[in-house]
Image (tube, rainbow, N blue to C red):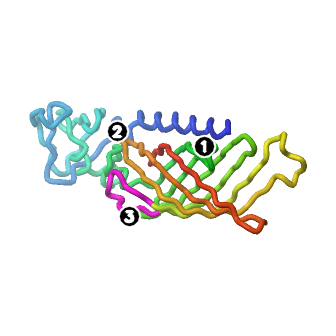
Amino acid sequence: MNRLKKIATYLLWLSLISLTCPAYSAEEAEVMVKEAFVNMHSGPAGGYPVIAVAAQGQWLSILKRRTTWFKVQNEQGKQGWISQADLHLTLDSKAQAVKLSDGSFESFAQRQFEFGAMAGSFEGVPSVSLLANWMASENIALGLNISQAVGNYSENQLAMLNISHNAFPEWRLAPYFVLSAGKIWTKPKGGLVQSGDEKRSNNVISAGVGLRYYLTQKFLLKLEYNSLLVKTDRDTNEELAQWQLGFAVFF
């Protein structure tokens, strides 16, 4: 349990650090205008007057970035500011279109990976989970979820592979459905263990429903409920429930 908490804390710090780092290292980069022209403003906002125009084929040196605006210098030595939208109208030194990820909802829709931490209840016992998802498409995600729940009588660890479906990827607040399969390891507390037979592992499958909400920058919130069916050696299988609430960062 403590190890999962340490990993979750590390993940939180990693995500906060990633928010402070620019998505694109523009310091002293050079780009070429591929459209008819790009307006250069006197300041980092659309309300500042246009002081120069960079024509098609002209190279611009990017000096620094301020939010979604970039200070540039043209071939004549004139300096000004262009918007990120205008920067997307340029090519880099390899003749590739410049495309930046600024943590907007548009970049969220184009994400490839999610990493997160969640906490909640596993059959009334506090639980902590770590998740990693790969976006196979805008609707389908494949992932891994590792959970640990420690109660008064036993400790449970789960490792689940899952596939989730989001029918409304364009919604900021959207439901999703998830199917999972994996293993659960149950270990009774030390005072209750009489022999090694009390430790057991079982196959488990689950179906769940969740709600994800895009917050801002690279963050999203996730609320999820899963109904688990544990395949046991006994006459009846176990039915368990898990609630989780947490956050994820995307890249």
Give whichever of discs 2 and 3 has the lower sequence position: 2
Q: Nearer the viewer, residue 52 or 220?
A: 220
Q: Is residue 166 magenta?
A: yes
Q: Nearer the viewer, mark 1 or mark 2?
A: 1
Q: Position of residue 133 (x, y in %)?
A: 52, 55
Per the image, the residue denoted by label 2 is 26
Amino acid bearing label 3: Ala
Q: Nearer the viewer, residue 152 or 185?
A: 152
- Horizontal arrangement in the rendering, residue 198 relative to residue 214 (left or right): right
- For the N terminus, give its image quadrant: top right
Q: Nearer the viewer, residue 204 or 5?
A: 204
Q: Position of residue 3 (x, y in %)?
A: 67, 38
Residue at 27% across, 39% down: 68
Amino acid bearing label 1: Val
Amino acid bearing label 2: Ala
Q: Are dots 1 and 2 in contact, CB under 8 Å? A: no
